[in-house]
Amino acid sequence: MSAKPSGDKRKKTPESAPGAVWFRAEKTSRTRPQLSHERIIATAVELLDRDGVQKLSMRRLAERLGAHATSLYWHVATKDDVLDLALDAVFAELDLPDEHSASWQGDVEAFMTGLRSVLLRHPWAAALAGSRPLLGPHALRSSEFAYTALATGGFDGVHLSSAAATITHYVIGSASSEAVWRKRSDEAATRSAVDAHLRAHIDEYPTLAGHFPLLKEDDWDAHFHRGMRLLLTGLTSSEARG
């Protein structure tokens, strides 16, 4: 997947596109750099957690680091570099077992619940994860875990790719939606207004009007787990399994 430009309408070259940071050769210096990748990434995550993706800029990041912009650009060429590195730092928080269990379904569930947890810990991360290639070492490690679990379950070839995409997209999409709703201070009022609107137009939307899910604050977990169980049931009974 590719991301839409963020505040920059100029055509991006492969060297400046999302994900490009993982293919650049690491710079070396004979002098000790003022900054480190670790400090830059940690500070970027802190700013993203506080302000979100749109408000992050190289200037603001440099100011937060107490460094000159040229020092920052020595380490990271673009804002997309920063976002890729910060997102992979989020994936680094995903705590997966060192070894797979006897149940491939259990491993898939561990991947899905763990990924959801870290994405919700950083509300900007889910939407960003759905908009760019996930090629950092920690993201690839988590993908390797999920692919191996599904391969153990009997999926291979294009069916393995489809199964992995299904579980990953479900987690990213649901976490992105939840993060957006949880930012609203009037979530309950908004849902009530939507419900009233649907009921007022029940002739046009009879099914929606009768079943619109008025989620309570503590119902997000149950909503996610119901969907996950439906997915796992479908995967388990799939004819695509070898």
Image: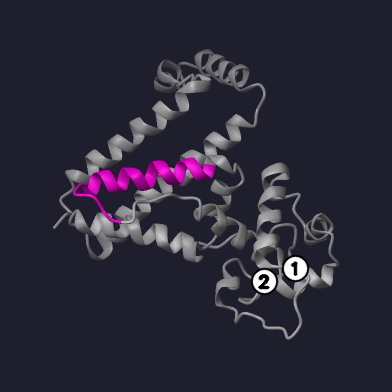
Element marked by disc 2: loop
Per the image, is 100 magenta? yes
What percent of the width, then of the height, locates residue 178? 53, 34
- What residue is rendered at 28% in x and 36% in y? 230
- What residue is rendered at 66% in x and 59% in y? 41
Which secondary structure is most common in the magenta stretch?
helix
Number of the label disc, if any, that sits on residue 35: 1
| Residue at mark 2 to residue at mark 1: CA–CA distance | 26 Å
Picture quadrant where residue 78 is located: bottom right
Identify residue type, mark 1. Leu
Residue neighbourhood size for the residue with mark 2, other residues' Cα within 10 Å, grouped as few (<14), some (14–19), many (≥20):
few
Q: Can residue 4 be seen in this view?
A: no
Instruction: Tell me which segment is drawn in magenta.
Output: 99-119
Residue neighbourhood size for the residue with mark 1, other residues' Cα within 10 Å, grouped as few (<14), some (14–19), many (≥20):
some
- What residue is rendered at 83% in x and 67% in y? 69
Q: In this view, does 8 lie above or below 73?
A: above
Element marked by disc 1: loop
What percent of the width, then of the height, locates residue 32? 75, 77
Q: Of callouts 2 and 1, which one flags the residue occurring earlier in the amino acid sequence?
A: 2
Q: Which residue is disc 2 drawn over?
A: 12
Q: Judge by depth and name the residue closer to the eye, 224 or 209.
A: 224
